[in-house]
Image: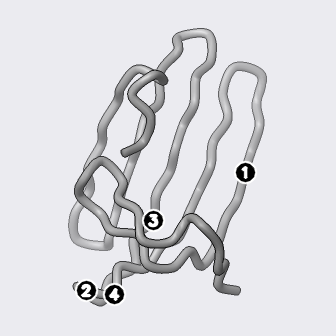
């Protein structure tokens, strides 16, 4: 399923351009929320698995982005957002 909405054509941490979102999974735990996205970047023809871990008590967001060959991990304050 491809989600066609306002989330297309934005960038995650200025590195990955989101052209299509293929899959969304949200898992809520006691101290954190984990969002898993499978996105497509058409320019480089790659699928990227993105895990967004939101820790409200620590007020931090952790991004883990994998495309099969590479992995990028970034952690930042919630106030900075994902872009």
Q: In the current view of this chain or complex, which residue is farthest to the top?
A: 57
- Residue 10 percent coordinates (x, y): 41, 62
- Residue 31 percent coordinates (x, y): 69, 19
Label for residue 26? 1
Precedes in sequence: disc 1 or disc 4:
1
Secondary element type, mark 2: loop
Residue in the foreground of this view, choosing between 5 and 37: 5
Contact between marks 2 and 3 (CB within 8 A): the answer is: no
Precedes in sequence: disc 2 or disc 1:
1
What color scheme is it? one colour
Residue in the foreground of this view, choosing between 73 and 6: 6
Contact between marks 4 and 2 (CB within 8 A): the answer is: yes
Secondary element type, mark 3: strand
Q: Which label lies toward us, 2 or 1?
A: 2
> On screen, 30 above or below 45?
above
Residue at 67 percent across and 64 percent down: it is: 24
> On screen, 82 above or below 43?
above
């Amino acid at each position: 399923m491809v989600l066609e909405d306002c989330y297309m054509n934005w960038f995650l941490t200025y590195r990955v351009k989101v052209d299509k979102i293929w899959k969304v999974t949200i898992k809520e735990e006691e101290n954190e929320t984990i969002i898993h996205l499978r996105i497509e970047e058409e320019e480089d023809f790659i699928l990227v698995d993105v895990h967004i871990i939101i820790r409200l008590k620590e007020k931090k967001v952790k991004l883990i982005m994998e495309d099969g060959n590479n992995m990028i991990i970034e952690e930042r304050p919630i106030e900075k957002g994902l872009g």
